[in-house]
Image (cartoon, rainbow, N blue to C red):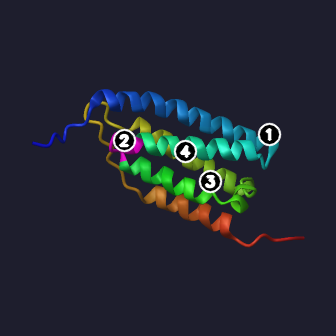
Amino acid sequence: MLNDTPDMSAVQDFLGEAHLLLSRGQECLQHFHQIGEDADASHCLIHTLASLRDRARSVGLLEIADFCAALVALLEPAEYRNRLHGPALGILEACLCLLAWQVELIDPYSGTLNLDAEEQRELLDSLENILRAPVQTA
């Protein structure tokens, strides 16, 4: 017989770890604000989002896992990493803010997250359009 009840201790562990990972992601964004196109901050942010993706997937929070996976896929190409300033950085900040809200909305008793993924799609589309737009030279 299959047990569909989530392991609540794993969910609680995830919640604590997710807060730490999101804090690390915010630190990466601060580096982008202070230094600009920082390869170390890019690597840290991608690694942080991949860790959050993996942890979310392990507890069955596929909405968060899929959002993180999409962000990692957008940020991994080297040519897009040096575009994380201006509007792209603002959208990336909004993505991390949305992730933080989603973590807060996880039901601590059932481990479920009921959400409409429309805001995720809109942010991902906006970020993708900015990162993939042709570079304009003056």
Using the numbered discs, state the Cα–Cα distance from disc 3 to disc 2 in whole angstroms.
27 Å
Which segment did they paint magenta? 56-61
> Looking at the image, do the residues carrying marks 4 and 2 touch, with CB atoms under 8 Å apart?
no
> What numbered label is drawn on residue 78?
none
Residue displayed at 67% across by 39% down: 28
> What numbered label is drawn on residue 34?
1
Compare marks 4 and 2 and give the one earlier in the sequence.
4
Residue position for label 3: 91
Compare marks 4 and 3 and give the one earlier in the sequence.
4
Residue type for callout 1: Gln
Residue position for label 4: 49
**Label 3 Cα crowd, 10 Å radius (few <14 / some 14-19 / many 20+):** some
Give residue 15's quadrant in the image.
top left
Residue type for callout 4: Leu
**Nearer to us: label 1 or label 3:** 1
Residue position for label 2: 58
Residue displayed at 73% across by 58% down: 83
Residue 59 drawn at (x, y percent): 34, 39
Of residues 54 and 100, which is closer to you in this image?
54
- Asked whether residue 102 appears in the rendered view, the answer is no
Of residues 50 and 62, which is closer to you in this image?
50
> Looking at the image, do the residues carrying marks 1 and 3 touch, with CB atoms under 8 Å apart?
no
